[in-house]
Image (cartoon, rainbow, N blue to C red):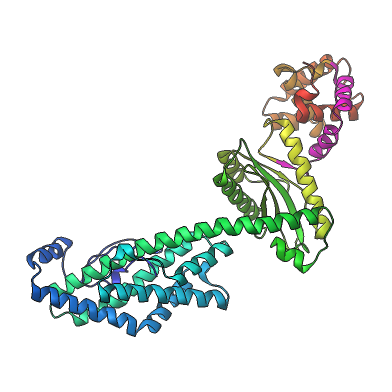
Amino acid sequence: MSLAIPNRLCRLICIPDTSPRRPQRATIESVGTIDQVRGERRVHEPDEEFTAAVDSVVLTVGAELGEHLAELTTLVQERLTGEITDLRGDPAVQELLHASIESNIDALGRILRYGLAVPEATAPPAAAEYARRLAQRGTDPVALLRAYRLGQETTLSWALHRVDGHAPDRPVAIEATHRFVEASFRYIDAVSTQVVAEYESERVRWLANSNSVRSATLSDVLAGKVGETAATEAALGYRLRQHHVGLVLWLDGVGSPDDLRALERLLAAIGKELGAGSGLFIPQDRSTAWAWLPFGRTNARADTLSRAVLDEAERIGAHVAVGSPSVGLEGFRSTHQEARAAHQLALNARGRLARATFWSDPDVRAATLLLRDIDTSRRLVASALGALADDDEATARLRETTRTFLAEGSSFASAASRLNVHKNTVRYRLEKAAEVRGRPLDEDRLDLELALIACEWLGPEVLHR
C-alpha cells in the first residue's frame, strides 16, 4: 500500500498529488474551496443522525474493501510494478508483493469497519516479510516508500468513488471522505515507519552474514584455494569469468558505516562512468574497501576519471587506487594485487597526490618498485640528483619542471603549456636544475628519471633534509 491521491480522482476533498512524477497541485471539482469545505464541516456539528449516516457510509465502503480485495490488490500491484521498476522481479517476489498489498488493504478495511485505533496498527507479517526481501536484494528503500504512497493513492481513489455513491448528501460525503483520508494517512504513517525499520534491520543482518561468507570465499579465491566455479561465483555474488578492474577505496580518518555507504556510492559512480556493471564491494574496516568492477566480455580502459567523480571523492574525503583491466580468475587476482600496490604507494605519498592512483600510469609502476627497497632508492636519488634532491619548495619546483620537460619529449613548448608558464621560464628552470644537480640533465638519463619519480612519490623518505 502507499501514500497519495491523484488530483484527477479527488472529487470530494482537496488533497495534494504527491506522486513523484507529477507536479503537485490541489483541486476540488464539486465541493468548492478548502475554506468552504472546512466551513461546511463546522456548520454540520455532529448529531446522532448525522454521525450514524457517516458511520454507515464508512462501514459500507470498508466492507466493500474486503469484498473487492482481490480485484483491488491486482489493481494496486499492476500500478506499482508499472511505475516502479525496482519492484519488478521473479514470480516469488511478485507473489510476496501481492500478499503485502492484500494484507495492507485488508488491515485498513478492518480499521474502518471496526473502528480500530490506527496508532496501534502493526505492519502485517506479509508486508514486513516483503520489506525484508527487498533489503536482501539491495533494493533502494525509496522504492518501498514510494510503493506505499502510490498504493494509498490508488486505494483511496477507489474508495472515494464509492463514498460518493453511498453518501445521502454532500455533508455526509465530506465527513466520510475526511475519515477515510485521515485513517489511511495515519495507517500508512504507522506501517511505513515499521516496514522501513524492518528493512534497515534486515539489511544490516543480511550484509553482515553475506559479507562473512563473501569475505571467507574471497580470501580463498585470492589465495588460489578455489577455482572458477559456479559455487564460488554464487558465494561472491560476482562472475569471475569476465573482464574486471580491481580497486581499493579508502577514507581520510577512521570512518563509519555511513562513510562506507558513501564509498559504495562512489564505486557505483566510477562504474557508471567506466561503463561497468554492478560491482563487488567488500569492506575491510570502517574506512577501507576492496572492490571489483565487471565489464563482461569487453576489455575496459581504467586510466582516468572525470572531474565530477574526483570532486565527489574529495567531498567525502575518499581516495581510490585502480588496477589495470584483466580477465578471468587470474585477472581477478592480478588487478586486485595492482590496486593494492597502488594503494600502498598512495598511502606513502600521504595525500600529496591526486585523489585517484592508476596502476596503468608507468610512474606508479616504477614508484611501486622503488618503494620496496627504500634504502636503495635513497642511494639512487642521492647519486642521480645531488643537491636537486633537497627538500625545499624552490628545489621541488625545479624537479617538477625537469620531470615535465622529460615527460613531454624534451619539448619546451609542451612543458610550458602543461605547467602553465612561459617557455623561457621552463628554459631558465632547466638551466638552474642542471646547475644544482652539478651536471647536465641528459647525463645518466634513466637514473635521473627514476630518481625524479622517487622524489615525487616517496617524498621525505628519499629527499635530503
Image coords of residue 262 (percent x, y): 57, 47
* Residue 388 locus on image (x, y percent): 81, 18
The location of residue 429, given as percent across then percent down, is 76, 19
The answer to whether residue 303 shows anywhere in this view is yes
Q: Residue furthest right?
A: 444
- Determine if residue 30 is in view: no
Q: Observer-nearest residue: 245 or 408? A: 245
Q: Is residue 422 shown left or right of residue 326?
A: left
Asked if residue 330 lies in the magenta stretch, the reply is no
Residue 368 shown in magenta: yes
Image height check: is 234 above or below 211? Answer: below
Residue located at (79% from left, 50% from top): 335
218 w.r.t. 79: above or below: above
Q: Nearer the viewer, residue 445 or 152?
A: 152
The C terminus lies in quadrant = top right
- The quadrant where residue 32 appears: bottom left
Is residue 234 shown left or right of residue 88? right
By secondary structure, the bulk of the magenta-drawn segment is best described as helix
Q: Image quarter for residue 172?
A: bottom left
Which residue is rendered at x = 41% and y = 75% of the image? 103
Foreground residue, 47 or 61?
47
| Residue 319: % across, % down | 65, 40
Q: Residue at x 57, y 46 (%)?
A: 257
Left or right, 95 with reference to 14: right
Which quadrant: the N terminus?
A: bottom left
- Magenta-tinted stretch: 357-386
